[in-house]
Amino acid sequence: MSVISRATAPPATHDVGALVTALLSNLETAAPAGLFAAPGTGSAGPVPASPLALMTAPGVPAGLLGPTGLGSAALRVGLPVPAARPPRIPSAAAPSGLPGPAFGTQPHRIGRPEAESADTRRIPPLYCPPPVRDDPVLAEAVNEGILAWSESIGLYEGRLDELRKADFGRLIMLAHPDCDDADKLLAAAKCAVSEWSVDDYYCEEDADPHAPDGSMSTAEAELGPRLELAMAAMDPVFLPDRYQVQLERALQADPILRAFRTSFAHLAQYATPAQLARLRTEIAGWFIALGAEAGWRGAGRMPPVWEYLANRQPHSFLPCMAPIDAVGGYELPAAEYTDPMVRRVTTTAALAAQMVNDLYSMAREDLSGGREFNLPTVLAAEEGIPRPDAVRRTAEVHDELMHRFERDATALAAGASPELLRFLTGLWAWLGGNRAWHAGSRRYHDD
């Protein structure tokens, strides 16, 4: 990370600790009202001056549209609805003129409500915070950057409309509310899209059956070698000269490998070497989990629930969460990130986020002919229960993980460093943003 970036990054303060403790000790459905309303100001507190202030200081996140699409209503189930809607306050976190409810009101709905009401019943209410901010203009700027980058490296060639519909820029905007720098968000978004492209290119039924040297093979047999090359794209390999040329040729020939190389180069403008190494480690664990899942497919075996969940801890949003501090403009020291209790909290958050993905990706994965796994499918097979019951059980697993996250993170927050307090807050915000994005992304449903 550059000296200028560090100098201009909003400092971590001990005030964040009080917020985190309030957030994580709350036993209600969503974040405490104190996050949004200052004492004595009703529901319309002072307007924060920056996204970080929006995340860590009192005030209504004005202009918050609320997620749309499948399951969006569940984000605010159980919250009190005031007799009259408070006035909307303009905020730098969202363009003026955008309609949006204050915290605790019914969500603003966009699109076709009849389609939403029919689909929402499939996703039970989840114990999860709402997003901290919604800035459609910033999200669109990140989306445009993703599309330009993808086109330049040949990623999703002929499928850019599909990439646009996924709206990954919105995910990154929602998940990192302490950053309003579009280029920094784009760096994180490129890494996330690179990771998603592995699923879309290497793990699908119609994956390329050729080996990296051009010889005919099978997609199943070449998954491991392809993931190995992806690691080489992120963590440079130094071979004898004549073989280095051949490796470079292979790295340049595959758009996924070009994606990993260029996304890491972009993130390196904002992340320290230790933060980049952390991300590589999380991705490597995910690659191992992808190999295990391929083993289930090859054997035609449905894993038991315990094995599936063990696989889904690394095969989760850990790689996407790893750059939280780099995007936020600070660094959580390696000794803290790898502390056993911090690790427990982080992996719990990642697994909870993955359960959200399992619920929202069911319809898409049902079309895979049994190639894709999700917890409702595994639960239904193991316990012999109908799909609706398996969906409800998955929601219970999600909620159990969220409550564990709150308990463990509260204990950590009591004596944590300012950097760790910010990271815990970032995890909480990431969970809310991830849930809101899944509720609206057309990757999982087409409203």
Image: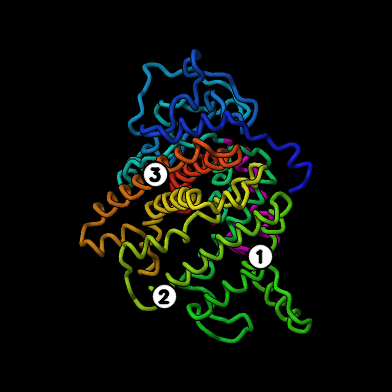
Residues under labels 3 and 1: Cα distance?
32 Å
Task: Name above or below for residue 91 compared with residue 375.
Answer: above
The residue furthest bottom is 215
Q: Would residue 136 appear left or right of 69 to someone viewing this image?
A: right
Q: Which region of the structure is painted magenta?
A: 135-162
Task: Name above or below for residue 373 compared with residue 168.
Answer: below
- Residue 297 x/y as whole percent: 39, 74
Q: Would residue 418 appear left or right of 302 to someone viewing this image?
A: right
Task: Name above or below for residue 191 compared with residue 49.
Answer: below
- At 58% from the left and 19% from the top, the residue drawn is 46
Q: Amino acid at mark 3?
A: Met
Q: Earlier in the sequence, mark 3 or mark 1?
A: 1
Secondary structure state at the residue bearing disc 1: helix
- Residue 188 x/y as whole percent: 63, 51
- Residue 42 visible? The answer is yes
Q: Is residue 77 magenta?
A: no
Residues under labels 3 and 2: Cα distance?
30 Å
Task: Name above or below for residue 210 compared with residue 420.
Answer: below
Magenta stretch prevailing secondary structure: helix
Q: Which residue is mark 2?
A: 295
Q: Amino acid at mark 1?
A: Met
Q: Amino acid at mark 2?
A: Gly
